[in-house]
Image (tube, grey):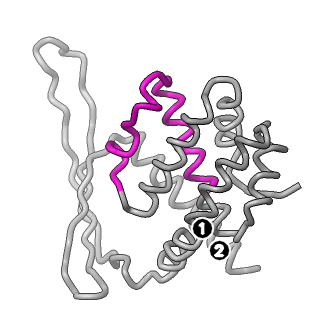
Amino acid sequence: MVLIDIGEDAIQALSATVDTASESQVEALGIAALAVILGLEREDTALVCPALEDMDVDMIKRTYSALVCLFLEAAKNDRSQSEVVLFLRSECGFAEARGDLVAQLFTGKKDDLRGLLSQTANHSYLPHLEGVEWKLEYCVPAPDNPAVRELLYRVCLNTINREDGREDKLEFVASVEELQDLVSRLKDACKSVERAVQR
C-alpha cells in the first residue's frame, strides 16, 4: 500500500465522489486544483465550468480541497503515476479509469508542483515578522439586535520584506475564541517544529 498522508477528511471526500460525481466532474476539479496551486487561475474562476454546474457546492469544496492535498502531498513525496493510482484505488475506492485520470493530471504537472514546493522551502521570500500591535474593539449592538455584544481584537502584524526591505502590515479582526484558536495552533506548530528538529 502506498502512503500519501492527506488526512481522513480528504480521503472521505475523495471516496464520496465515487458515488456522487462523474469522471468529468472529478477531472474538472483536478484541473481547477492544479491551476490554482500553480497560480494560473484564481479559485473563484477556476471552479466555474459547465461540468460542475449540477454538482453540490459542498461536494465541490470538499473534493477540490482533497485534490489540492493529494497533489501537493504526492508531489512532495515524489510519487509516481502508478503509486497515485494505487492509493486512489486502495484508500478511496476509485475505479482504475478514474484513478488513472486523476493520476495523469498529477503527473502532467508534477514537475511544476515540485518546483513550486522547492521555492516554498526557500524562506527568503517570506516576510519577516517585526512586531505585533493590537487593540481591543467593542462590537456595538444594532438597534434591531441589542443582544449582540462582543469583544473583538484588531491585530496588526508588522512585517519586513527580506528581499527589498519594504515594510508592510497584515491586519485582521478576531474574536476572543478565534484568537485562542490561533494561539493554540501556533503552539502546536512550534511543538511540531521542535519535534522535527530533534529527529
In the image, is residue 57 part of the stretch drawn in magenta?
A: yes
In the image, is residue 199 part of the stretch drawn in magenta?
A: no
**Depth check, front residue: 71 or 49:** 49
Give the amino acid at mark 2. Answer: Glu
Q: To which residue does mark 1 refer?
A: 110
Q: Is residue 108 left or right of residue 36?
A: right
Read off the magenta span: 41-70
Judged by its main secondary structure, the magenta piece is helix
Callout count: 2
- Residue located at (70% from left, 30% from top): 18
- Residue located at (72% from left, 55% from top): 5
Instruction: Judge whether 1 appears above or below 168 on screen.
Output: above
Badge 2 density bin: few <14, some 14–19, many ≥20, Cα 10 Å: few
**2 or 1: mark nearer the eye:** 1
Kindly give the residue lying farthest to the top in the view shown. Answer: 144
Q: To which residue does mark 2 refer?
A: 194
Q: Secondary structure at mark 1?
A: helix
Task: Give residue 144's position: percent from left, percent from top.
Answer: 14, 11
Q: Which quadrant of the rendered structure holds the N terminus?
A: bottom right
Quarter of the view holding residue 82: bottom right
Instruction: Judge whether 19 appears above or below 199 on screen.
Output: above
Task: Give residue 192's position: percent from left, percent from top.
Answer: 64, 66
Q: Earlier in the sequence, mark 2 or mark 1?
A: 1
Q: Secondary structure at mark 2?
A: helix
Kindly give the residue lying farthest to the left in the view shown. Answer: 143
- Residue located at (56% from left, 36% from top): 24
- Residue located at (45% from left, 52% from top): 182
Instruction: Judge whether 25 appears above or below 96 on screen.
Output: above
Give the amino acid at mark 1. Answer: Lys
